[in-house]
Amino acid sequence: MQRIFLDTNIVIDFLGERESFYEPAAKILTLADQKKIKVYTSPGSVSNTYYLLSKYENAKVALEKMRKFKLICSISIMDDKVIEKAINSGFKDFEDAMQYFSAIATNCDVIITRNEKDFKNALIPVMDTESYLQRFKK
């Protein structure tokens, strides 16, 4: 089963039901719910998403969304080794470095993000939701 890492922006697109971005993110999460893929996100993505959702929605509603999301999404590894690799990497954005090395440590096969350019030296495929869904159908 393919292991997919969801960047923070994809988690926010899904849980925040962002117009134009929600539908493809929901399709990926549906694949996970159907046990066709396994999805992961980082602990930082969970906390950042909750923070943003709670600013725009009721905190109780945001927490319930996080609870339901956690039923279909596993949490990736974020440990000393991941942080050390991120610190010593050539990434311009430290958060992206942490996401990338967390996905690698968790043995993910692909990273799904709307910021593909931020992962230009990745050793695993990096793509947006639409590209992944097209590739998944093949």
Image (cartoon, rainbow, N blue to C red):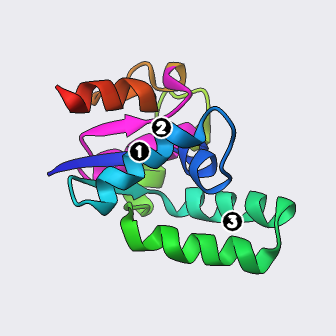
Check contact, mark 2 vs mark 1: CB within 8 A: yes
In the rendered structure, find residue 27 and report the number of the disc placed on it.
Answer: 1
Image side of residue 63 versus residue 27, left or right: right
Gap in angstroms between the C-alphas marked 2 and 3: 20 Å
Residue at left offset 42%, top offset 40%: 100
Q: Which residue is mark 2?
A: 24
Q: What is the three-letter code of the residue carrying label 3?
A: Tyr
Image location (x, y in percent) of residue 103:
36, 47
Q: Secondary structure at mark 1?
A: helix
Please, what is the three-letter code of the amino acid marked with disc 2? Pro
Number of numbered markers: 3
- The alpha-carbon separation of the residues under discs 2 and 1 comes to 5 Å
Residue shown at the point (40%, 53%) measured from the top left: 29
In this view, the residue in front, 62 or 91, is: 62
Mark closer to the chain start, 3 or 1: 1
Q: Position of residue 48 (x, y in %)?
A: 67, 58
**Which residue was labeled with disc 3?**
50
Q: Secondary structure at mark 2?
A: helix
The residue type indicated by label 1 comes to Lys
- Find numbered disc 3 in the image and state the secondary structure of the residue it sits on: helix
Q: Locate residue 44 relative to residue 63 in the image: left or right.
A: left
Point out the frontmost of discs 2 and 3: 2
Chain part drawn in magenta:
96-116
| Residue appearing at x 61%, y 57% in the figure | 15
In the image, is residue 99 part of the stretch drawn in magenta? yes
Quick one: label 2 or label 3, which is nearer the N terminus? 2
* Residue 87 in view in this figure: no
Q: Is there a contact, CB below 8 Å, between mark 2 and mark 3?
A: no
